[in-house]
Amino acid sequence: MALDGDACAVLEAIAFGNDPRITPSDRLRALEQLQAFPDQEAADVREILAGMSPEEIAFEWDLFCGAEVVQEALNESGKNAYPRMAAAIREAVEQRASEIVSGRVRSGFEASGTGEVSASR
C-alpha cells in the first residue's frame, strides 16, 4: 500500500513542522510512518539512475543545472534561492562583456568608441 499525497503531507508537517504543540514522540511516530511506506517516485528515480553510466548521469546533471538551476538563479525570484550563484554568473558575464568591449578578446566583432558593434573581417 502506498502513502497518498495528503497523508504524506500531513506526516511531513508533523515530523518537520515548527508547531510547538507537536511532541517529540509525535515527530518520531510520523517519521516511522513515513519510512514504512515506499516512496515510489524516489524508487523510480533510483531505478533510472541505476541503469545509467556515470558519464550519462554527469551529462543529465549538467543539463538540469543549466536549464533549471541557473535560469532560476538569474530570475528575480531565484536571487533569493541562489544568491551566490546569481552573483557569480552576473560577475562572469560582466567581466566577459567588459573584455569584449575593451578589445582584449577577439570575438569576431569590434566595438567602436560610440558603443556600436560591427562584425570584423
Image: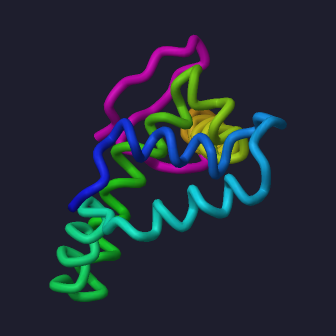
Q: Which residues are magenta?
A: 104-121
| Colouring mode (rainbow / by chain / secondary structure / one colour) | rainbow
Would residue 99 be visible to someone looking at this image?
no
Tell me where residue 68 sits by quadrant.
Answer: top left
Q: Which residue sits at x=37%, y=36%? A: 6
Q: Magenta stretch mostly in which secondary structure?
A: loop
Quadrant (top left/top right/bottom left/bottom right) for the N terminus: bottom left
Above or below, 47 relative to 30: below
Task: Pick the residue in front: 117 or 82.
Answer: 82
Q: Which residue sits at x=47%, y=49%? A: 106
Left/right of residue 74 with respect to residue 43 in the rendered view: right
Task: Pick the residue in front: 108 or 12.
Answer: 12
Tell me where residue 13 sits by quadrant.
Answer: top right
Above or below, 13 relative to 59: above
Residue 73 in the image: state x and y as whole percent.
Answer: 55, 37
Residue 79 in the image: state x and y as whole percent.
Answer: 64, 30
Task: Pick the residue in front: 57 or 27.
Answer: 27
Residue 8 in the image: state x and y as whole percent.
Answer: 42, 46
